[in-house]
Amino acid sequence: MNDTRVAELSAGDVSAVRSLYHRVLEGWNLRDGAAFAGPFAVDGELIGFDGSRHGGRSVMAAELGRIFADHPTPEYVAKVRRVRALSSRVAQLDAVAGLVPDDAEDLDPALNALHTVIAVDAGAGWRIALMQTTPARYDQRPDLTRALTAELRELIGRGPGPR
């Protein structure tokens, strides 16, 4: 068997990848499609909570802009669980996120999610190649839903961006 050790990321690279994720959520919370899409690669892809796919930064910006204009959107709170190297210039960020509806002061546990971000540095700085949102339903495990909701509740009111 050929086990190859994946390269480590520098602290600066980890910080850069975390910053991309922070900027995406900040764009969402500002309800600004261009700000949301800005950290993505030109050909980046977004897979939303409902399974919808948006390919390309300009398409993402336009689609999110339309959504923000037509619908009140909840505000994100999030916590980065880890950033790890997949290769020397490819990283995976895993986070948990919750949404506070516009007219509420608490999370809607039905909207809790896992975010997976694949970021690449092709020589011009880090960019998001793919971001996927997976509902954190935890079927048959209400204890996990309660624990995640309690963890995310601690972030409400601490300002934008993931911890």
Image (spheres, rainbow, N blue to C red):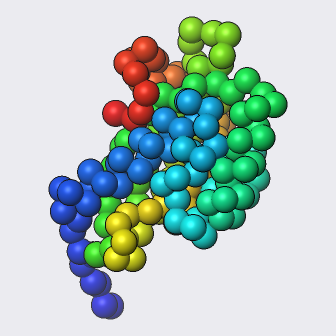
Q: Nearer the viewer, residue 43 or 94?
A: 43
Quarter of the image with the N terminus in it: bottom left
Q: Does any portion of residue 45 appear in the rendered image?
A: no
Quarter of the image with the C terminus in it: top left
Apparent side of residue 115 relative to residue 54 in the rendered image (left or right) = left
Q: Nearer the viewer, residue 39 or 8?
A: 39
- The image quadrant of residue 65 is top right
Q: Residue at point 40% right, 35% down?
A: 162
Q: Position of residue 62 (x, y in %)?
A: 72, 50
Q: Position of residue 16 (x, y in %)?
A: 31, 54
Apparent side of residue 84 relative to residue 93 in the rendered image (left or right) = left
Q: Nearer the viewer, residue 8 or 123?
A: 123
Q: Residue at point 66% right, 50% down?
A: 61
Q: Position of residue 6 (x, y in %)?
A: 27, 75
Apparent side of residue 34 relative to residue 155 in the rendered image (left or right) = right
Q: Nearer the viewer, residue 119 or 68?
A: 68
Q: Residue at point 23% right, 65% down?
A: 9
Residue closest to the far bottom = 1
**Relative to 50, residue 68 above or below:** above
Q: Does any portion of residue 2 appear in the rendered image?
A: yes
